[in-house]
Each structure stands twice: as structure tokens, then as C-alpha cells.
Image: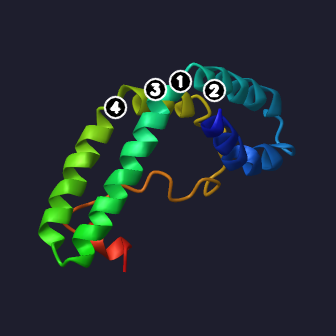
Amino acid sequence: MKSIVILLFLLFPVVAAAQDQPDMGKMMEALQEMQQCMATVDQEELRIFEQEAEEMEAMLQSLCQQGKRDQAQKEAIKFGKKTMKNPTLIKMQKCGEMAQGFVPEGAIEGMNDSFDPSKNHVCDDFD
């Protein structure tokens, strides 16, 4: 439920911007389908993932503070690979794709930024 509310708040600017667009009915239908899809996401699995992510963040921050940058980077990459295979997150991503094409350019800027370990270091996020 919490994730649905967060997602709806993220998409609120999309709905507001669409009020002037002739395809608002189609967009509202797509958003409703997305909401129904999100309602099928296993909330317990999502809660477990959120807890794991919080624990990972704390561990990474600790490693970075101890100067163990290489180990932190390896752990972050390992967790990222595990995350990409998480069925709950994959389902949420598919639900989000239902609104694709109706989202105005820049409305959810930065949401699809990918982490490139060759250009970014996880410890730089904690500085």
C-alpha cells in the first residue's frame, strides 16, 4: 500500500499536466491499470526487500567510512545484480511500464538513471 501511495504521488504531476491533453481518458485508464497491477504486488516481499536495502545501505556506509571502498563497491554491485533479478521489483517495473507513453518528458526525470560502476563509486553517494 505504501508503494502505491508513493507511486501515485510521483505520478501526480503527470496527471496534472495531462489535463490539457486530449488523451486524458486513455492516460487515466492506463494509470488505473497500473494501479491495479501494483495492488497485486506482494507487500510482504516488498517490505522484506526494503529491509534488505536499508541493511545494505548501512553496511555500505560503514564500509565506506572505514575506507574499504573496493569491498563496498563489490557488495553494491552484488546487491544490484540480486535486485535486478527480484521478482517483486520486476513486477513493479512491468506495472510502471503500463503508463509509458503518457508520461510527459522530464516528469520523472532521473528515475531510469543507471549506475555505471566504471564511472561511479558507491562511496561517493555517502560523502
**Residue of label 2:** 34
> Where 94 sits versus 77, above or below?
above
Which mark is first along the chain, 2 or 4?
2
Residue 104 location (% of width, % of height): 66, 49
> In the figure, is residue 97 to the left or right of 55?
right
Q: Does 123 sit left or right of 127 as displayed?
A: left
Secondary structure of residue under mark 4: loop
Q: Is residue 35 above or below residue 80?
A: above
| Residue 121, visible in the rendered structure | no
Label 1 environment density (alpha carbons within 10 Å; few <14, some 14–19, many ≥20): some
Residue type at numbered disc 1: Val
Secondary structure state at the residue bearing disc 3? helix
- Secondary structure state at the residue bearing disc 2: helix
Q: Residue 81 in the image: x percent, y percent?
A: 24, 43
Q: Is residue 108 left or right of residue 27?
A: left
Dot 2 or dot 1, earlier in sequence: 2
Percent position of residue 52, x then y: 36, 44
- Viewer-nearest of labels 4 and 2? 4
For the question of whether residue 50 can be seen, the reply is yes
Disc number placed over residue 91 in the picture, else none: 3
Q: Find out whether the residues at labels 1 and 4 contact each other: C-beta distance under 8 Å.
A: no
Closer to the camera in the image, 103 or 50: 50
**Residue labelled with disc 1:** 41
- Residue 92 to residue 111: above or below: above
In this figure, which residue is indicated by the disc labeled 4? Answer: 86
* Amino acid type, callout 3: Lys
The reply to whether callout 1 and callout 3 are in contact (CB within 8 Å) is: yes
Write down the quadrant of residue 1 in the picture.
top right
